[in-house]
Amino acid sequence: MREWLRGLSPQGRRRIGQDIKTVEFGWPIGMPVCRLLGGGIHEVRTSLAQNRIARVLFYIDKTPDEDLKLARSNKSKHERGLQ
């Protein structure tokens, strides 16, 4: 576990997880939870106790076309097997 994460209370870790989940399932989402920093880097901002803020940085990566093609092929094979 990262050193900075050990210093967080269970409530703080929970709040960070909730904000990450909000971004994951509500994408695209903006401030005050998430903002673009530039260069394709985004941050999730979480307000913590004692006037602290946690920042989790992330970027969005495109799924390679060959992986999408394989997934579509597998889906098609699966659907044919159900008929």
Image (cartoon, rainbow, N blue to C red):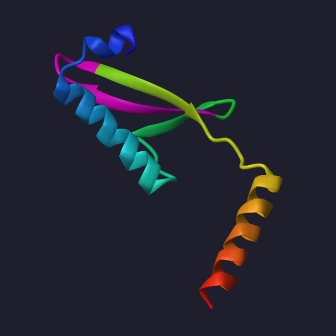
> Is 47 within the magenta?
yes
> Is 42 within the magenta?
yes
- Asked if residue 74 is positioned above or below residue 32 in the image, the reply reads below
Tally of numbered tags: 0
Q: On the picture, is 9 further left or further right than 64?
A: left
The answer to whether one can see residue 14 in this image is yes
Instruction: Please identify the quarter of the rendering in which residue 56 is found.
Output: top left
The residue at the point 65 percent across, 82 percent down is: 81
Q: Quadrant of the C terminus?
A: bottom right
**Residue 41 at what x, y percent from top left?**
61, 31
Q: Quadrant of the N terminus?
A: top left
The answer to whether one can see residue 32 in this image is no
Q: On the picture, is 14 further left or further right than 32?
A: left
- Asked if residue 19 is positioned above or below residue 64 in the image, the reply reads above
The residue at the point 32 percent across, 31 percent down is: 46
- Asked if residue 33 is positioned above or below residue 5 in the image, the reply reads below
Instruction: Please identify the quarter of the rendering in which residue 79 is found.
Output: bottom right
**Residue 55 at what x, y percent from top left?**
41, 24
The residue at the point 76 percent across, 54 percent down is: 67
**Residue 28 at what x, y percent from top left?**
51, 53
Q: On the picture, is 44 further left or further right than 81?
A: left
Q: Residue furthest front?
A: 81
**Residue 19 at what x, y percent from top left?**
34, 40
Q: Residue furthest bottom?
A: 83
Q: Which residues are magenta?
A: 41-52
Q: Residue furthest right?
A: 66
The residue at the point 25 percent across, 35 percent down is: 15
Q: Residue furthest top?
A: 3
Prevailing secondary structure class for the magenta stretch in the rendered image: strand
- Asked if residue 56 is positioned above or below residue 33 in the image, the reply reads above
